Amino acid sequence: MIVDLQRFLAGERPFWTEFEKMLDRLEAEPELRMTLPQLQLFHHLYERTAADLAKITTLSSEPETRRYLENLVARAYGEIHETREKQRRFFPLKWFSQTLPQTFRRHVRAFYLSVAITLVGCAFGGLAIAFDPDAKPVLMPFSHLLADPAKRVAEEEKATHDRLAGFKTTFSVELMTHNTKVSIFTLALGMTWGVGTIIMLFYNGVILGAVAVDYIHAGQTKFLLGWLMPHGVVEIPAILIAGQAGLLLALALIGRGSRVPLKTRLREISGDIVTLIFGVGVLLVWAGFIEAFLSQYHEPVIPYEAKIAFGAIELILLSLFLAKSGTGKKPES
């Protein structure tokens, strides 16, 4: 075989250079997952480089080029036939700012269903209190909610001492722990084909609706908003996302209209469920901190308008985060 060496080197070197860049990137980023076009290009360059190596081997005048091509082919062979699981690095900031909101949006229909179930519960609880105020002992889970709202507000506003003094951190941790347990339980009940998750979401809605109507009916709307908004605009969405994860698990178990085996369906959504519930945990840590250090303090200590404004800003930021963060970024596999 007669080869015009200089023309051959000039024509093929750009392909070798591009191939080398792809190999460098694969070795520098072990967690990288190439797209189908990238894989096709990689395969084409691998075959072309291997063919060029076969041609150059017949020429004794180019030992450096031959060694260079041998190195490229060997590196590519190692990447293609690697059998060890590559250790994927975890980047918390990237996970929170990209993976979490992308996962949320990917299953947003399950979130909407979670919201709908909770709203039905709110309507039920609100109507129950409106038509039967004596139902409070049945609907309210905490003793301090059984008192007359106007009397409670008067007592809170007259308080001259900090009832959480020296106890804020403990109270905050108790809130985080309790709410996280409720969220994990709501998710786990997805194993009941979603029945348990639906009941939990409905019941949480009943409590929220009953409390809201009770305080509004007593003319304490401003107190209600100032009390609930600072932590509630984060805590309530967190519970709803836990419900989203539980419903996602239930849908995978039911598999209606899908011919994919159950094991495969569960494997496909397992990573997303873990992402969602860890995101819920992060949100509940913030909510617990805010409830202990801000929500429990009322006028004249902290003006209601300031607390309501703070809650509104939180709600806007959380909504923008879930709707926009990570947009345009490639989701991690």
Image (cartoon, rainbow, N blue to C red):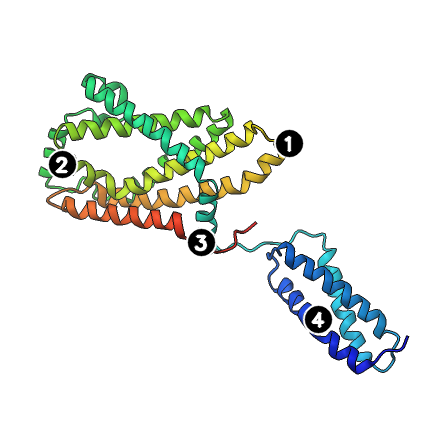
Q: Residues within 10 Å of mark 3 (few under 14, many from 20)?
A: some
* Secondary structure state at the residue bearing disc 2: helix
Q: Is residue 324 above or below residue 235?
A: below
Q: What residue is shown with label 2?
A: 156
Q: Nearer the viewer, mark 1 or mark 2?
A: 1
Q: Is residue 219 above or below residue 137?
A: below
Residue at the (41%, 38%) spot, across then down: 241
Q: What residue is shown with label 3?
A: 327
Along the horizontal axis of the image, is 38 left or right of 68? left
Mark 4 and mark 2 in contact? Answer it, CB < 8 Å. no
Which amino acid is tagged 4? Phe
Residue 160 position by quadrant: top left
Residue at the (36%, 34%) spot, across then down: 115
As measured in the structure, the alpha-carbon distance from the residue carrying label 3 to the one carrying label 4 is: 33 Å
* Secondary structure state at the residue bearing disc 1: loop
Q: What residue is shown with label 4?
A: 15
Which amino acid is tagged 3? Thr
Mark 2 and mark 3 in contact? Answer it, CB < 8 Å. no
Along the horizontal axis of the image, is 24 left or right of 196? right
Q: Residue furthest right?
A: 1
Residue 245 in sight in this render = yes
Which amino acid is tagged 2? Glu
Q: Position of residue 47 (x, y in %)?
A: 77, 63
- Which numbered disc, 1 or 4, marks the residue that appears first in the sequence? 4
- Which numbered disc, 2 or 3, marks the residue that appears first in the sequence? 2
